[in-house]
């Protein structure tokens, strides 16, 4: 990722405007260096922690129940929240959010959870789509180097969060241990041209946003619900021109977006700048009649928002939490770039 301080998102926020005489908001902490308290940034274990939003399972194309063998590994990895700022993440399969699990209602899932041998602590998995003690957490508590297997039937449709649920669960989730499991209705979901999968969480550290060096986890910050970063897929501004680049789609495509909020504490005011949630599946409910043309919707911690958008004009669609200080100062911004020829009858920037 190219360097991008935590306040650089002001130019990207899109909802915010300023005259030429106004100063961009600043965060004095971004001027600090590792000489002023933090250890230097540590070598990273992985180059990237942010999951690829386009990497999710294909839609269900089977019409009768089947059994799925799914293996997930819990890991602890040092990676960059933003350039020059390292942090020890906890993950499912080395990514935030963890990989999406996708099945059909009535399917059976045989899930094996392995805790990597080099892990320092115990991990488990609680799937909100599971009837059973702790959503499976009670029977998947695994020490480093160990594995556990559970089997469950996917009995109720919808898209649900999964997360680590050890006694220190808030810290493990904040450090990256959450994902989504989608249980499609028997008749499937409406066909779309493209699907994307994002995850939001807060990261609490002993440094300020943009402060170079290695950031340790801050339990007091978490207890007071004052995060250093609020991220999309575990990194600040990952899917912008200064990160890994926007996610690109073609003009005219209908796009379904899944937005898992791991939390552990903050409700997301999920909003698309330059678009609306044309079809909104509130709270991950994929069977009730959806809402239509919703501008902003809450996605509470421990739930997944799902929505479909149309893309009639080219340009950026900015995915944000409309609690805008999280956008401007803490990292919660991603861009979907719609590519194609202009449509001046719909939007004309130079009438």
Image (cartoon, rainbow, N blue to C red):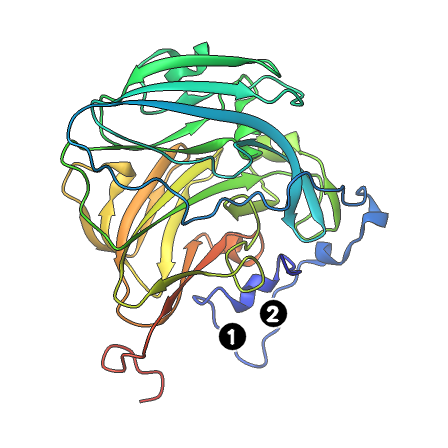
- In the rendered image, residue 198, in percent from the top left (x then y), is placed at 42, 46
Q: Which residue has dot 2 on it?
A: 24
Residue 63 seen anywhere in this rendered image of the structure: yes
For residue 141, say whether it is visible.
Answer: no
Q: Which of 297 and 52 is in front in this view?
A: 52
Q: In this view, does 296 lie above or below 120?
A: below
Percent across and percent down for residue 141 are 51, 13
Relative to 202, 257 lies left or right: left
Tell which of 51 and 303 is nearer to you.
Answer: 51
Residue farthest along the bottom direction in this orientation: 351
- Mark pair 1, 2: CA separation: 8 Å
User: Closer to the camera, 304 or 96?
Assistant: 96
CB under 8 Å between callouts 1 and 2?
A: yes
Q: Is 114 located above or below residue 345 in the figure?
A: above
- Local secondary structure at mark 2: loop
Say left or right for 80 vs 153: right
What residue do we see at 65% from left, 42% from top? 79
Query: Quadrant of the rendered structure where residue 89 is?
Result: top right
Q: Residue 291 carries which label?
A: none
Q: In this view, does 10 lie to the left or right of 182?
A: right
Residue wearing tag 1: 18
Q: Earlier in the sequence, mark 1 or mark 2?
A: 1
SS state under label 1:
loop
Q: Is residue 170 left or right of residue 82?
A: left
């Amino acid at each position: 990722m190219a360097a991008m301080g935590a306040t650089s998102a002001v130019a990207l926020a899109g909802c915010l405007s300023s005259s030429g005489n106004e100063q961009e908001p600043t965060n004095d902490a971004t001027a600090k260096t590792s000489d002023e308290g933090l250890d230097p940034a540590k070598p990273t274990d992985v180059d990237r922690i942010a999951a690829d939003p386009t990497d999710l399972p294909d839609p269900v194309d089977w019409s009768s129940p089947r059994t799925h063998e799914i293996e997930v590994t819990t890991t602890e990895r040092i990676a960059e929240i933003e350039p020059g700022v390292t942090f020890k993440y906890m993950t499912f399969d080395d990514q935030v959010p963890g990989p999406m699990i996708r099945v059909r209602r009535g399917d059976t899932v045989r899930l094996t959870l392995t805790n990597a041998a080099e892990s320092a602590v115990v991990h488990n998995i609680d799937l909100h789509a599971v009837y059973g003690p702790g959503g499976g957490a009670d029977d998947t508590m695994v020490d480093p180097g160990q594995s556990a297997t559970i089997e469950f039937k996917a009995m109720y449709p919808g898209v649900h969060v999964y997360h680590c649920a050890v006694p220190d669960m808030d810290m493990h989730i904040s450090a990256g241990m959450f994902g989504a499991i989608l249980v499609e209705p028997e008749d499937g979901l409406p066909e779309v041209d493209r699907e994307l999968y994002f995850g939001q969480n807060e990261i609490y550290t002993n440094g300020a946003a943009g402060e170079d060096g290695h950031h340790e986890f801050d339990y007091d910050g978490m207890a007071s619900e004052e995060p250093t970063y609020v991220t999309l897929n575990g990194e600040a501004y990952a899917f912008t021109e200064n990160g890994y680049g926007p996610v690109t789609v073609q003009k005219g495509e209908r796009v379904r977006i899944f937005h898992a909020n791991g939390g552990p504490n903050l409700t997301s005011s999920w909003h698309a700048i330059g678009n609306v949630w044309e079809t909104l599946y509130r709270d991950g409910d994929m069977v009730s009649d959806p809402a239509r043309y919703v501008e902003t919707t809450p996605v509470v911690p421990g739930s997944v928002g799902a929505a479909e958008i149309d893309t009639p004009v080219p340009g950026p669609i900015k995915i944000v939490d409309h609690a805008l200080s999280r956008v401007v100062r803490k990292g919660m911004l991603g861009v979907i770039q719609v590519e194609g020829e202009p449509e001046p009858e719909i939007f004309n920037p130079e009438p």
